[in-house]
Image (spheres, rainbow, N blue to C red):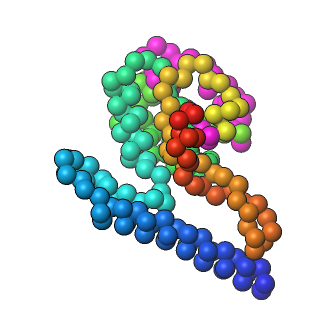
Amino acid sequence: QEKSWKMQKQAQSFKKRKSQIASAVEDALEVADFKGYSLRTKESMSCWNPDSIGFNLIEHVLCHIVKNERPGAVLVFMTGWDDIHSLKDHLHAHPLLGDQSRVLLLACHGSMSSTEQKLIFENPEGGVRKIVLATNMAETSITINDVVFVVDCGKAKETSYDALNNTPCLLPSWISKAAARQV
């Protein structure tokens, strides 16, 4: 019963923190002057949710790279396995990014088999763009030689301390500008 109470208090604290972030964003959007921006940009900003990762934005950036940019692999930083897996499914359904004759979609995570992990370091056949979905751990622990483009979702899991349960926990949070520049 005590543990249940602690979990409820933690959930309330998390909701309060989320609502503070959301209200700050809403306040900023209210006073923002979007004159000079296209209607599409204005609509996009009005739909922005600070608690979610913009899979659609990542999809559009990847489409632009595949269609318009020079050859080379793309490394996409995500927050964890669930987001990597969800994004991979999302991209597989896309007509261009899901086309295996043009794009090789790979996930990079420690829970994968070594056979799958080896594909990340191999160069794909000519004309095929390799896209690797990974956590920010890949930033410091591995080197993929053919990576030319890096797309960062802007969030990373950071260790926080849960005072109610006396345990550390990993929670996604926005990365700092300094961390984003390091990439």
Is residue 105 visible in the rendered structure shown here? no
- Name the residue located 61 percent from the left edge and 23 percent from the top edge: 144
Q: Is residue 29 left or right of residue 146?
A: left
Residue 120 in the magenta stretch? The answer is yes
Q: Is residue 91 left or right of residue 123?
A: left
Residue 152 in the magenta stretch? The answer is no
Where residue 110 sits, quadrant-wise, is top right
Image quadrant occupied by the C terminus: top right
Q: Position of residue 71 (x, y in %)?
A: 43, 17
Q: Position of residue 88 (x, y in %)?
A: 51, 42
Q: Position of residue 47 (x, y in %)?
A: 33, 59
- Name the residue located 41 percent from the left edge and 31 percent from the top edge: 99
Image quadrant occupied by the N terminus: bottom right
Is residue 98 visible in the rendered structure shown here? yes
Q: Position of residue 93 (x, y in %)?
A: 41, 42
Q: Relative to 169, say whether 178 is above or below.
A: above
The span shown in magenta is: 111-136
